[in-house]
Amino acid sequence: MALKEVKISKTLKRTILLNPGPSTTTEGVKLSVLQDDICHREEEFAAMTREVMAGLTKVVTKNTADYETVLFAGSGTIIIDVATSSLVPDGKKILVINNGAYSQRAIDAATMARVPVVEVKFGLLESFDLAKIEEALKANPDVHMVYTTHQETATGIFNPVKEVGALAKKYGKVFTVDTISTLGVLPFDMEEENMDFVMASSQKGLNAYTGISWITGKRAEIEKTKDYKPRSYYTNLWRQYDFFKKNNQMHFTPPVQIMYSLQQAIKEHFEEGPQKKYERFLAGWKAVKEEMEKLGFRSIVPWEKQAGFITSLQSPDDPNFNFDKIHDYLYARGITIYPGKLAGLENFRICNLGSLNADDIRYAFKVLVDAMKEFGVAVPVKYNS
Ligand SMILES: *Cc1c(COP(=O)(O)O)cnc(C)c1O
């Protein structure tokens, strides 16, 4: 007797997600999750997983022979737990360069894993002062790893990681970067950028579904962590890497369907071409800038300090401007905008990380203008000072 087939019929709406992940997915990614049920221990699935890992390594380096990607099931923050708890031996410290919410998250994660932190703090809109970082390295010879965020997602500020990596190298430190909001968007080679480990998550720049996060690093550097005492059972890098190496499959159950979406997203990433894809994002950013200027919106971060995918807009000083109401108006029309994460200045964010083009951005601004008119907000917008 044959097994019954499952018939599925539903039309999916394409929405414009302007929040910092999950991002708008393609039709191919949407369809990719509809798979026959399969056990993750089957070789068919394990082989696909290995293909995904190799593809993810290829996204960040030409030197695929010397680098490895290690997968974990979870949103991006799980990989912050992995990096902060697995890469520093007992008795050593992590130095975190902190200019925003996402580097702060690493400080909190390290602290909870009982890894001593040396913090080098900069203001939210401040550029890194390399001399101050070097001073901290000189003053703290027991630092083992330097850590920071590539693009601070809270502000959209782009941090000079290559220069920081060169400093880390000069002092013989491991350099780990949270590239969660740049990987798959901004083409870079981690070797050229002086990065030892990079971190990413399926729902951001690669535009797959949420549920898988990973770390990519030089195999020789991963091997060095072999004898570090684990601080966690599940989020330990060595345990996960070692199990995979010995068994050719993941240690615990991965989100099976999400793995298919990631496979599809990697395929589409290389089909579009990293450089062309980047240019599409930049065209979207240019549209954000032009539309903002047309409407009189202020960018919180000076344009030249931004990575180009996340823009923080200062909310107008208009009694009729209510973010929640505007959000709801846009949401009802398939567009999602996101509140800001900066204390002191009222703001909201437009993130251009998904399968979107400049026309989608212009359309979103058109609906934003409709919303502002509907609620009696002056257009162009006004600020008191
Ligand atoms: C999105 C993001 C994360 C992870 O957030 P999750 O909600 O756990 O996926 C971490 N760091 C940066 C820089 C991010 O943009």
Image (tube, helix red, strand yellow):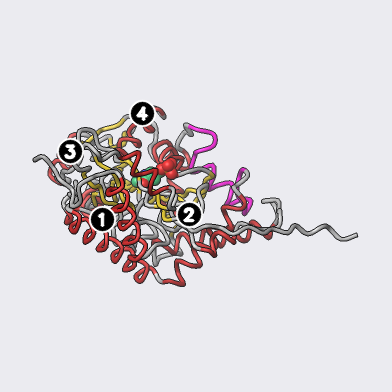
Q: Is residue 142 above or below residue 262?
A: above
Residue 11: within the magenta? no
Do the numbered discs 3 and 1 sit on residues whose CB atoms are within 8 Å? Answer: no
Identify the image quadrant of the C terminus: top left
Helix, strand or loop at label 4? It is helix
Cβ of mark 3 under 8 A from ligand 1:
no
Q: First in sequence: mark 4 or mark 1?
A: 4
| Residue holding disc 4 | 111
| Residue holding disc 3 | 123
Q: First in sequence: mark 2 or mark 1?
A: 2
Residue 241: within the magenta? yes
Distance from Cα at disc 2 to Cα at disc 4? 25 Å
Residue 286 position by quadrant: bottom left
| Disc assigned to residue 307 | 1
Q: At 29% across and 40% down in the image, what residue appears?
A: 340
Residue nearest the observer in this picture, 241 or 342: 342
Give neighbour class at mark 3: few <14, some 14-19, many 20+ (Cα, 10 Å): few
Location of ligand 1 given as a quarter of the image: top left
